[in-house]
Image (tube, coloured by chain):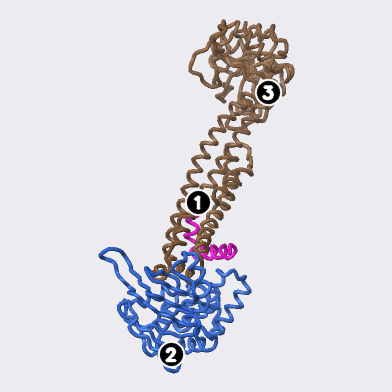
Amino acid sequence: MSLPPLIELRAVTKVFGEGPSAFQALRGVDLSVSRGEFVAIMGPSGSGKSTAMNILGCLDTPSAGAYLYEGVHVEALDRGQRARLRRRHFGFVFQGYNLLPRTSALENTALPLIYRGLRGPARRKAALEALDLVGLSAWARHSPAELSGGQQQRVAIARALVSNPTVLLADEPTGNLDSEMGRGIMDLLTALNARSGLTILMVTHEPDMAAYAHRTVRFRDGRIAADDARQAA
Amino acid sequence: MLASAIVLAFQAIRRNPARSFLTVLGVVIGVAAVITMVTLGRGASRAVADQISSLGSNLVVVRPGQRMGPGGERAPQFRAADIQAIRARVASVTAISGVETAGATVVYRAHNWSTSIVGVDNDYFRARQLRVASGRLFSEAEQRSGRPVCVVGETVRRELFGAADPLGARVRVKGFSCDVVGLLTSTGQASMGMDQDDLVIMPLKTVQRRLAGSNDIGQIVLSVRDQESLERAKAELTQVLRERRRIARNEDDNFNVMDTRQIADALTGTTRILTLLLGAVAAVSLVVGGIGIMNIMLVSVTERTREIGIRLAVGALEGDVLLQFLVEAVTLSAFGGLVGVALAAVSSIVLTRMMAVPFAFDPAINAVAFGVAAAIGVVFGYVPARRAARLDPIVALRHE
């Protein structure tokens, strides 16, 4: 069972700004996530969990320490290489859905495929499959304004899944939803994790939602304060 | 990727049609102005060239002073003896005449008309290949003694006589009466405000005595046998005049000799410079149009920061975003260029009509203006596009 972890942070620190006004967001974080895990990341605002997520998603780089993705030192990659790694392996789901307005669910879902060089018909086919996966194939022609919050988040998840990522990074995916819609989203994520072995890292404030994950990592003051895995995992 | 960038560009442009239109207006006006100016200028050049070439190709014009147009120095005028000397010593001359021009109002009964009175010998008609449609030229006696007789141009006939027959009529010019003996065949050349049928021709002596009040000759017009003898004739004629005007070996001519082609070159040269100047001024407006595009693209990048963040997060590379915004700018400017070309076609046709110059469609300037418009999209679109591409996805996503 000594398979190398999919994701590994080693003594990662992150400092914003310089001199006396510098703010240390991460103060030495060690974290390793294996393929197929469903990890909830919790912690109060300013505890460093969003910074950690940005680094994990290759959107940001650590000030010091190492980030290994499948054994590759991400901190040594340049902006373009990180963008390619991100494109190849990561899907993002945001609290605010971040769908393009005045653009149909289908086109929103197909957006990542434009940047992967797929042609129109292939894009539509893959996007429809992804929408089907989140149970929205009937809403493909609707624009975000015509969808409920839960449906919008499902479109966002479909968009994150359409490119077949290894890791899904979800930043408070249920933060804008009522608890019923939130549970629906969590059921969907759990099913994706169980069915296709999708690795999921999810930031959340709500213990109810974190309970869906196998493992909960708690941040406090730029450090990991607790890392509990549920027995059942 | 490029195809989808173009699709995206059209989506973005359609999303804001009013703004897109105002953005490209600068380029539209710039392109239209450049093309129209150059087309008009070329039309004017062609009009001048046509007019000059209608003079006949073997024509030589000699004027006092060093250059065409009003010169600073007062060079002496020519005399009748100069013309006799040239006729005697330059073998290839087929016709030669002094020309003295004065402006005057010609009156016939209740009508009067302000025109140029041109004093010439009969040789002038031969050199210029002018003919009378009816009536006759001047007789030997009339030329020798400066009788008050005249041949009128078509425009003068129309203005003074209307439907009446001008032949045998008596018109008043300044203080004397003058018999109309001939009507000039219309040359049909009316362009750039210069009507070649708007003149009254009299014997040279008549104009000298009754209008100019001197024996000066302002201009010598002559024709040579053929194109081949032209250069030699000009050289001989220059030599004769230098001797007669006692110009020392190391002095410059105080007269100038020009053949038809040189006159055409000199005149079209002027219009060409004017065309260039007008085109340059118009080109400035094209650049201003480009700045307008840059301005709007910068605003657009700021407005769409969140969209850019989304694109970067779902896998767009820097180059993809750069391409998207660059293509958008180029699409805008190229569209402006196309509309400008169309507008220029309309305005050129209308303006050439109004100015009575030929419409000289020039594919090169249309292509160049359009190309410059598209290039302006690249140049002025690059800075906003790069700004979009360099956005930090984290910051862009958080942007409200």
Outermost residue toward the front?
A2
The foreground one among B386 and B229 is B386
Marks 3 and 2 sit apart, C-alpha to C-alpha, by: 107 Å
- Report, in whole angstroms, how far the alpha carbon at label 3 lies from the one at label 1: 60 Å
Asked if labels 2 and 1 share a chain, the reply is no
Q: Position of residue B198 (x, y in %)?
A: 61, 26
Q: Is residue A44 above or below residue B387?
A: below
How many residues crowd mark 3 within 10 Å: few (<14), some (14–19), many (20+)? many
Mark 2: few/some/many CA within 10 Å (<14, 14-19, 20+): some
| Magenta stretch: helix, strand or loop mostly | helix
Q: Which residue is mark 3?
A: B184
The residue that disc 2 covers is A212
User: Mark 2 or mark 1, which is nearer to you?
Assistant: 2
Tell me what residue is drawn at x 57 percent, y 7 percent. B249
Q: Which chain gets the brown colouring?
A: B
Q: Is residue B102 above or below residue A18?
A: above
Question: What's the distance in space between the residues labelled 2 and 1, CA to CA?
Answer: 53 Å
* Disc number placed over residue B305 in the picture, else none: none
Q: Amino acid at mark 2?
A: Tyr
Which quadrant: the C terminus of chain B?
bottom left
User: Taking the image as drawn, is residue B173 in sight?
Assistant: yes
Q: Nearer the viewer, residue A164 or B397?
A: A164
Any magenta on residue B8? Answer: yes
User: What span is in magenta?
Assistant: B1-24
- Disc number for residue B379: 1
Tell me: residue A153, above or below residue B52.
Answer: below
Identify which residue is drawn at 53% across, 57% down.
B332
Q: Secondary structure at mark 2?
A: loop
Task: Name the subunit of mark 1.
Answer: B
Neighbour tally class for label 1: few under 14, some 14-19, many 20 plus, Cα within 10 Å: some
